[in-house]
Image (spheres, rainbow, N blue to C red):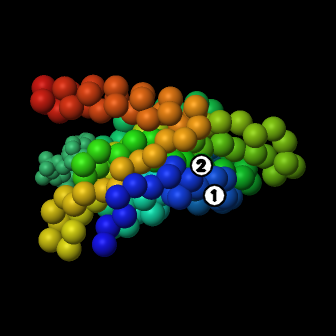
């Protein structure tokens, strides 16, 4: 039986570590943006499936901001959690940070919001558990996710 409600903490992931190798770089010798996006999507996907209990597909990635570059040998730390769920979709917020090889300051390099839709074996959207926000921070994210959904929906209607 599908669980009806889940806490943010039941699927949140903190500081998933990846190290920048030579094959991850662009011609500017910084971490290739497409590679960071794949890492981010993969962590966000794991969070979405832990919350939904089903296979999910990425429906939309928005508000993706590359803040700073990462370099060879940097440690990449990826954290994220579900901000809100609706009927069959949910929004995951992702933060990506870097730390140099000497263990220096941890700096944010990217943030993004991804929407996933849970699907059944026929690829049809299925219901996801309601998200229970507990802390003030979780509640703020819960509220702002609804505003982003409204903007996304009006953008989709326009396109
Ligand atoms: C995502 C997908 C399953 C939605 O199917 P659909 O028939 O359009 O579904 P519906 O219109 O019934 O919408 C289902 C949910 O998806 C949401 N949704 C659909 N497209 C969306 C988009 N572009 N952005 C945000 N949410 C979207 C709807 O808001 C709805 O959410 P709700 O049930 O929580 O209110 C379908 O568009 C798809 O398979 N897309 C390709 C996904 C993919 O290949 N991703 C990359 C690899 S993982």
Q: CA distance from mark 2 to mark 1?
A: 6 Å
37 or 148: which is nearer to us? 148
Q: Relative to residue 40, is residue 145 depicted above or below?
A: above
Judging depth in this view, the residue of 106 and 141 nearest the camera is 141
Residue at horizontal 75%, vertical 40%?
106
Disc 2 and disc 1 in contact, CB within 8 angstroms: yes
The answer to whether residue 142 shows anywhere in this view is yes
Q: Position of residue 5 (x, y in %)?
A: 40, 55
Vertical placement of 141 versus 133: above or below? Answer: above
Relative to the observer, which residue lies in front, 13 or 74? 13
Q: Residues within 10 Å of mark 1 (few under 14, many from 20)?
A: some
| Residue at the spot of label 2 | 79
Residue drawn at x 84%, y 42% as measured from the top left: 104
Q: Position of residue 115 (x, y in %)?
A: 34, 45
Q: Nearer the viewer, residue 67 or 46?
A: 46
Q: x and y percent of residue 159 in the render?
A: 13, 30
Q: Which residue does the image show at 42% across and 59% down from the upper left?
A: 51
Circle 2 packing at 10 Å, graded few (<14), some (14-19), many (20+), is many
Check disc 1 and report the residue beneath it. 16
Q: Going by the image, does 35 lie left or right of 18? A: left
In which quarter of the view is residue 96 placed? top right
Q: Is residue 99 left or right of residue 84?
A: right
Residue 99, compared with residue 153, is above or below; it is below
Please provide percent x and percent y for residue 91: 38, 44
Callout 1 secondary element: strand
Residue 28 visible in this rendered orientation of the protein:
no
Q: First in sequence, mark 2 or 1: give its number.
A: 1
Quarter of the image with the N terminus is: bottom left
Q: Which mark is residue 7?
A: none
Residue drawn 34% across the image and 31% down it = 146
């Amino acid at each position: 039986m599908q669980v009806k409600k889940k806490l943010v903490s039941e699927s949140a992931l903190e500081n998933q570590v990846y190290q920048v190798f030579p094959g991850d770089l662009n011609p500017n010798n910084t971490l290739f943006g497409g590679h960071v996006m794949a890492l981010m999507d993969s962590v966000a996907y794991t969070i979405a499936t832990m919350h939904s209990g089903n296979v999910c597909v990425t429906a939309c990635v928005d508000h993706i901001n590359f803040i700073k570059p990462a370099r060879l040998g940097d440690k990449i730390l990826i954290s994220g959690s579900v901000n809100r769920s609706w009927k069959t979709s949910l929004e995951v917020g992702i933060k990506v940070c870097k730390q140099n090889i000497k263990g220096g300051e941890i700096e944010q390099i990217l943030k993004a919001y991804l929407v996933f839709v849970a699907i059944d074996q026929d690829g049809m959207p299925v219901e996801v558990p309601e998200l229970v926000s507990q802390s003030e921070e979780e509640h703020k994210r819960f509220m702002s996710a609804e505003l982003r959904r409204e903007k996304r929906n009006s953008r989709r209607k326009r396109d």
